[in-house]
């Protein structure tokens, strides 16, 4: 979770502290600049030799804790000019001692560092560390036309006990954490292949971090999150199953249209806490022995009233409107005993239904 910026950086680092009322993190509004001369910043497709075009440039220092972060442009932002490519965003190490190449690794899809509608992965191995977010706009573009960015924590080094999944905690203080592991011994003999091993009584099998609520836990087949509440889910995790390699159960968070977080294995948290960044859906897959022994499907509701699913493992469960994820449930059952038929997911028609609640 991003650390609070130091006092000297506070005026330029609000990008790391989204407000609780909005999942989108608008860049801080820069001070008004004098109006540029007519024609400034409008290079056009054929600028004259020697012409210098003025640009509006704003920079923001973002302080990050240890972990892996995804920085991407929120949907619905201004489209770049087809000629100049502006507005544009670059993420880089800042100059001076705050730039720590030994502690920060920035990966972008373009070798020149521009986001260009894509995303950047920022890995911090030693805290605290800062990255420089620079926004370039045409001179006459106002701050309201600046790209809006989202920062999603994908993984962290902190762990917490199973009790944290039962008691809601202040969202701003909850660290990224692992999902509580099941503690009951695996079933023995022929019955082991017939039914999933059960976790200790009362221990959650699925955990989610809910807006203004904190961590909540439930069991497979039960809803996590409250349908109809319009409170979004910011992260989730699935507990490891006794007798099954955690790597055989993997899941992702839907971050945007066509954008998914990296796969994480059972027992790890996927998403963020206290950053006011909702997930837009989930995706689960089974590998190895888990895929041979069990069927998995899941369904979800979204803050706009959309209901999607059940969809089978390997399919994204998200709304066509990309509304925030409100509640979901995961069914994990022995093969041949699935109670609810899964419907095709996003790759096929009929992936969900929209229903006013």
Image (tube, grey):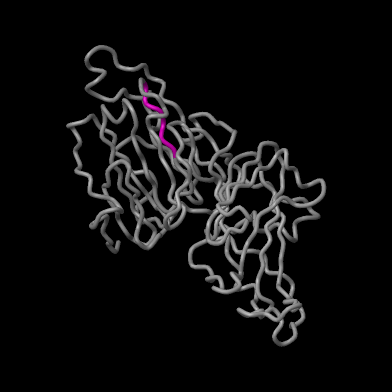
Q: Position of residue 95 (x, y in %)?
A: 79, 52
Could you tell me which residue is drawn at 27 percent across and 62 percent down? Answer: 355
Q: Is residue 329 above or below residue 245?
A: below
Q: Is residue 262 visible?
A: yes
Q: Residue at x 55, y 54 (%)?
A: 119
Type of secondary structure dominating the magenta stretch:
loop
| Residues drawn in magenta | 237-242
Q: Is residue 72 left or right of residue 100?
A: left
Q: Residue at x 75, y 61 (%)?
A: 11
Instruction: Give the vertical position of 164 relative to 1 (above or below).
Output: above
Residue most extreme to the top: 189
Residue 350 at x, y percent in the picture: 23, 57
The quadrant of the rendering that contains the N terminus is top right
Residue 27: where, in percent of width, then height? 64, 64
- Looking at this view, is 237 or 222 the one in front? 237
Q: Nearer the viewer, residue 49 or 55?
A: 49
At 37% from the left edge and 26% from the top edge, which residue is drawn?
241
Q: Is residue 22 visible?
A: no
């Amino acid at each position: 979770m991003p650390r609070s910026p130091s006092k000297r950086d506070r005026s330029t680092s609000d990008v790391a502290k989204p407000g609780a009322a909005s999942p989108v993190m608008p860049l801080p509004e820069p001070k008004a600049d004098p109006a540029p001369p007519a024609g400034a910043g409008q290079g056009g497709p054929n600028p004259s030799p020697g012409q210098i075009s003025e640009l509006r440039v704003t920079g923001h220092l973002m302080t990050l804790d240890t972990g892996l972060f995804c920085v991407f442009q929120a949907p619905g932002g201004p489209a770049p000019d087809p000629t100049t490519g502006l507005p544009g965003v670059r993420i880089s190490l800042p100059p001076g001692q705050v730039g720590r190449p030994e502690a920060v690794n920035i990966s972008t899809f373009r070798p020149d560092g521009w986001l260009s509608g894509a995303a950047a992965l920022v890995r911090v191995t030693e805290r605290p560390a800062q990255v420089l977010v620079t926004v370039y706009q045409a001179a006459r573009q106002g701050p309201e036309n600046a790209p809006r960015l989202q920062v999603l924590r994908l993984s962290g080094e902190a762990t917490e006990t199973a009790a944290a999944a039962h008691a809601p905690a202040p969202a701003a203080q909850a660290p990224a954490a692992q999902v509580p592991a099941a503690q009951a011994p695996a079933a023995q003999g022929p019955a082991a292949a017939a039914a999933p091993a059960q976790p200790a009584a009362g221990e959650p099998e699925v955990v989610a971090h809910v807006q203004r609520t904190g961590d909540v836990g439930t069991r497979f087949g039960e809803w996590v999150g409250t349908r109809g509440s319009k409170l979004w889910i910011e992260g989730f995790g699935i507990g490891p199953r006794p007798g099954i390699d955690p790597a055989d159960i993997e899941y992702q968070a839907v971050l945007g249209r066509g954008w998914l977080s990296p796969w994480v294995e059972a027992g790890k948290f996927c998403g963020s806490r206290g950053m006011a960044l909702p997930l837009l859906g989930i995706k689960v897959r089974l590998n190895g022995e888990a895929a041979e022994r069990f069927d998995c499907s899941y369904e979800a509701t979204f803050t706009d009233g959309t209901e999607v699913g059940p969809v089978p493992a390997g399919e994204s469960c998200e709304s066509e409107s990309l509304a925030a994820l409100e509640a979901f449930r995961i069914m994990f059952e022995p093969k041949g005993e699935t109670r609810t038929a899964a419907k095709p997911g996003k790759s096929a028609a009929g992936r969900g239904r929209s229903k006013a609640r």
